Amino acid sequence: MRTWTLLALALSGLLIAGEQSAVHAADKDMLVIALDTLGAQVMDPIMDTRAPHAHYQAPIWDSLVGFDLENGGIGPGVAERWQLAADGQSWTFYLRKGQRFHNGDPVTAQDVKFSLERVMSPESISSGAAALRRAVDRIEVVDDLTVRAYTKGVIPQFAASLSRAVFMEGSVMPKKYIETVGAKGFRDKPIGSGPWKFVRSVPGDRIEYEAVTYPHWRGTPQFKRLTLLLVPEQSTRLAMVRTGEAAIASIGPEAVKEARAGGMKIVSVPGTMQAVYQFWGLYRPEAKASPLNDVRVREALSLAIDRQQIIDHVMGKEARWPMPFAAFKYSSDMTIPRWEDWSRAALRYDPARAKQLLAEAGHPNGFTMTFWNTALPGTPFMVPIGEAVAGFWEKIGVKVEMKTVEWGAFDPMGRGEQKGLVGTASMYRTAGRPEPIPRYATTFVSKGVQHVFGDPQNCPALCVDADKAYEAIVAERDDARRTAATNRMIELVARSWIAVPIVEGMGTWAVNPKNVGYFKPIPGRHEFGDVAERMPRPDQKPWP
Amino acid sequence: MARVEERIDVELAAATAADDASRPRGDFARLPWGSFVIIAVLILVAVLAPLIAPHSPTEQSLPDKLLPPAWEAGGSTKHLLGTDVLGRDVLSRLVYGARVSLIVAAVALLAGGGIGLAVGIVSGYVGGRTDSFLMRTVDATLTFPTILIALLLAVSLGPGLGTIAIAITVLIWARFARVVRGEVLAVKARDFVALARVHGCSHLRIMAVHIVPNVLNTFMVLLTLHIGFVIIVEASLSFLGAGIPPPTPSWGQMVSDGRNHIASAWWLSVVPGAAIMLVVLAFNLFGDWLRDWLDPRLRQV
Amino acid sequence: MQRFVVRRLAQSVLLLFVLALVVFALARVSGNPADLLLREDATQEDRAHLLKALGLDRPVHEQLYLFLAGALRGDLGESIRYRKPATEVFFERLPNTLRLLPLAMVGALAVAIPLGVLAAVYRGTIVDRISGAIAVLGIATPSFWLGIVLIYVFSIKLGLLPSSRMGGPSHYVLPTITLGLFLVAGMMRLVRSSLLEVMGSEFVKLARLKGLSQTVVIWKHCLRNALIPVTTLFGVYFALLITGAIVTETVFAWPGVGRLTYEAVIFRDYPLLQAVILLKAIIVLGVNLGVDIVYAYLDPRVRYA
Amino acid sequence: MAAGAPVVLEVRDLRAYLYTRWGVVRAVDGVSFALREGETLGLVGESGCGKTMTGLSLVRLLPEPAGRIVDGQILLEGEDLVTKSEPEMRHVRGRRVSMILQDPQTSLNPVFTIGDQILEALRQRRADGERSLVAQAEDALRRVKVAAPEQRMRAYPHQMSGGMKQRVVGAIAVAGEPRVLIADEPTTALDVTIQLQYLALLKEIQARTRLAMLFITHDFGIVARMCDRVAVMYAGRIVETGPTRALFRAPRHPYTEALMASVPRMEGTVTRLPSIEGQPPPLHELPAGCRFADRCAYVDERCRREYPPTMTVGPAHEAACWRIERSPSSR
């Protein structure tokens, strides 16, 4: 019996010793960031679809269009500047001089053309690929540092779609290198032009990078090495930051109190998302009799919600008063001040008025409704917000039958005939985007995926107005008139109370001041893939 | 070859049935009053939840969120065991949670146990090819991720108590089937079954009259000892996001939600955790006592 | 022995075939990976393109045929999320689980056997009560909660141990305890009760009649017999653990196959899910076969014809 | 055996009780007897009269934790075994006192070979070393008439017949050359033909080693063949002790008389065997007076009130019954 146990222990010892050396907490030159997901963890821009790849692909690949580091939105990238042609049918990009790939090859217009075409190629499954395929007619190399893209029709936000500020596209890939080593070789030893070189990727565990040794336009890294860790459990991520095993960890608002208690600094990225609730298929005949079809009822439901309490208590103050649907302080093509005042007034907490409206609508002692509560990937705090909202509705007499569902199960219900959702409400979210209008198209235009106002076969007045308003914006070349048209669209949606913002969520991070110095995130961008290179060492810039 | 298979499973049945059998030969097995009391209180609380709970389990008051229990600084007697992230009363949720956890446990155990009992008896009694096939199915079922079934059912049947109960049932039946089969083999080997067959009893009669009563006490014991296991599985499913959906309070969900506040709000997970431990302890003691009480061999020592 | 092994393999193959069908069906009913990959503003046309790229546009029976034909050749298809062969993804992660699992099981045995023996020998005394308490603790504590509390105490408060992830030997302490406690509870009770059963038998009297000391009688004669059921439980627990490790691997950020199963389910990654479940089933059936062979070694009465 | 052989084992007023859930079972309630070298004493009585418990008390193997020796002495060549510590008892068991149990099926450890189990017993003895232990083990098997001992050594218990296994147990019991051998119904589980061989074997061993044997049984046929003297036990006490011949011819205690009457005789025709009505009293609620009172044909008022003393009724022949006092030479 004794020998049997000793033998087994020796065997396990063997296994342990064989594994690679670990990340040493005390390594000063290493910046460690703990994330809740590494997406598909595949080192190829055309292979990952959701946001995470902005974390782990951004360090290696630069985007054709970059960031406006101060107030979010787009700015100069691989292309210093770009121009929309007079006829609006093409965009010309002028590349920054002297950019190099990690293997020394220069970055040229051929690489940009090759990259955009590779994103649109059949085997590419990146989420923006479909939009690009629809937008781009053809791409022309003018000279080594100039490339022109011809679009199908006028697409005002085409340039923005080639930036990580808006979508996840526009990564510039090395044409010569990929053509020599092939796609598989490229994925095993990826090369880009970003401030960090690829070192190693341990599936499901971590990805390691090495800083480039030359100055980089995005910022020259202060740390020699960068490691992104996959730590799925939030309390474990928090523990790693507190023990110094990680410098930065992504956390949800519910953990902010715990992080502060542990002496960590909190970095909040404003305007990363907006938690909303919306009603589905009210225009459909089977939902005709539903009390939700009365706009007064819908407005009452918004007035019943105390958004300040949700911000203070559910989100631990790591959230802001929302702008209108899918709009943020850094949004373009809309008059921000007007809508700030609107949201303060229209989204106020006024339960008395709510009850009054309900009574006027013929429901003095409330009614019963179904509310789907779910959380999209990366924002688990949507479920507690949903519970709080349901709680407020119950307080004004509405009987809420809440169904909490995992996102993978809820998402398909929102596509096709949406039979499970018609006549019900659900939580949803809008991502932090400078341009609100594409998001409006998805939800309010009859041909959109969610078509909450109406579908092509059944498009009541509200649906027709929305379609017309959207067409007006898209076709408009003149900025001032496009802003007015956008305002009209936002007005139309706001007054419908069918899709209502709850709070503006923030990306929250716990930071260990002894591991990394003071840094500012990019407004609207939750991921740090484009921030790591500007993070100072703790001694260089201590936290205030 | 089948004979050898039987030997293994007879061993397992004896062992697993003895898994918790302490066979206190000659030991003074006094009635486990402690566990009777706890179980009685649990059932009472679950049944009379609306009367006992000071507040409604879903009533929120955000301003007084995360209040510590009354006896700690900052705690209020309005919320004896403090409040959670949404300001809901922890005590009330614990009380209603008892009801939910018991229902899930009851449905999962009776369904899972029932199927396991049936499969175990058939497999044990019939033996041969069907027996070894059923046992290999049991092996495979153990590798089946409960989370997949929980998620799958949530998608098709919609979230809720039923979904979780069915998901746990699929996990439970395999364990019951294996043990019951071993017990059936042990009983089948005894003389009185051969005797019954000699008297021309039909297989069904033999199973009903002879096999089931003898297997029943092991089955009863397994039921009590698996109460803890079911609640823990529900808690793990909640941790993975496939547990009983809010706003229905359940102990497993409460422990899972509390995990982010271990330092700043320890009571959120410790209170339901302690409740689970108490219930499991009570049912284990009750199971041990029940086994001795039911076990004919021990009665006339 | 050969005839037994061959028969067992035949049964296992049949079972794996049935399991493959069940998993194929279950995965598809739980949703479509394409929906998770598409952004909100993707149109039906985009969805069609993605389905085609992922090979999910083919009719179901064709997909089933491809899957089964592939399986026979050992090719279980390409993971939708990781864009590489599912078997490759699985075997990348398997060593990580196999670093933790045997350690937790052997550790549990090393604790459960002595404690079980003490509890049996000193039945009714304080030792028995303590071991009973540990057993209840093991059964009644959700492993994720135990893991998080251990991290809080040992790495945050005391700073003695790393909080999570793979690494040097110190990284193995907390995950092994978290995984092991549940095992210790079950095994200890089994060792105790089966030892009590054995201690009551006649040959124990004969052993003592030979003038052997109590310890020799217990540790040599009784324990050898008492361990026979434990080996069978070892097999059952291994099967449970290889799926049950999901929680521990999540809490300690351990990139094992348990966590991989969870990811495959959440992302509805059909090929990966099918591969993971089939490969795990093969491992479990293999381990159970191994356990039965060890069983024969331990119990001479069970020599396979 | 001549009465003059030295006394090897003397038991004085031994009491051993079992503390169970239903009260204290007074299994051995004041037993006294003596055992001489080379002599076989039969300990006889219905099942449940405490004879097995007496045997187990001698080697201090009463079932834990219920069983305990509460009073009396067990003098093995003058040393009292009751007061010895457990380590000291370990040197006694196997070397000076040994025991053969009833059921051979369960007496041997199923997972060890026969050879292992014999060698283990030999190792306990002061190894005389001049011949290897394995050879000694084979000799031990030969002495108990086990054929081909070399192969048998490697066999497992489940590969041997009941009779064979009981011989191995016998070999183990005498391996340590004990002074006293307690045989607790060693042949009950064997069929008749094997029984006779086994008894002859025990006789042969006794003749060679001059060991004293306490033979526990309920079978008078075996008593007649094996035992020099007999002690009859009833409800935890010895009611009559004496030479085998004397007890068969002139039993003085009513219980012995009734037992002898119920043994089928070869001579004479017997239509219906008499049996003793009633049941022995439960050992945890023993009556005050003589315990055979309820079932005794000659019971009187004194028998129920007072337990009779042990009186001598002949050469080395004693019995505990008031009737003896009333009619000293009834025979």
Image (cartoon, rainbow, N blue to C red):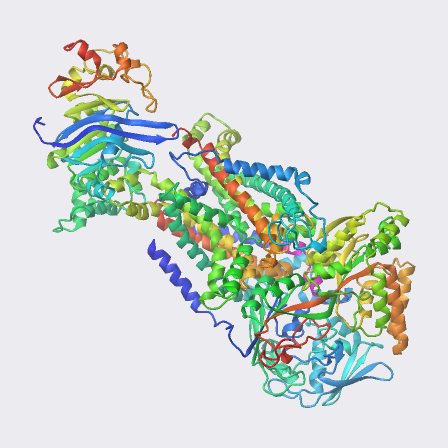
Could one spot residue C78 in this view of the protein? yes
**Lateral position of residue A124 relative to residue B300, left or right:** right
Q: Is residue A193 left or right of residue D128?
A: right
Q: Which secondary structure class fits the magenta region best?
A: helix
The quadrant in which the C terminus of chain A is found is bottom right
Residue nearest the viewer, comparing B204 with A355: A355
Q: Is residue A73 above or below residue B247?
A: below
Does C240 lie within the magenta span? no
Magenta-colored span = C21-40
Which percent across, then down, holds residue A466? 88, 64
Q: Decide if residue C8 is in sight here.
A: no
Q: Which quarter of the figure has residue D326? A: top left
Residue D103 at x, y percent in the picture? 29, 34
Q: Residue at x 65, y 47 (%)?
A: B77
Q: Is residue A221 left or right of residue D78?
A: right
Q: In the picture, residue A204 is in which quadrant?
A: bottom right
- Residue A129, compared with residue D95, is above or below; it is below
Of residues A116 and C97, which is closer to you in this image? C97
Residue at 55% over, 39% down? B38
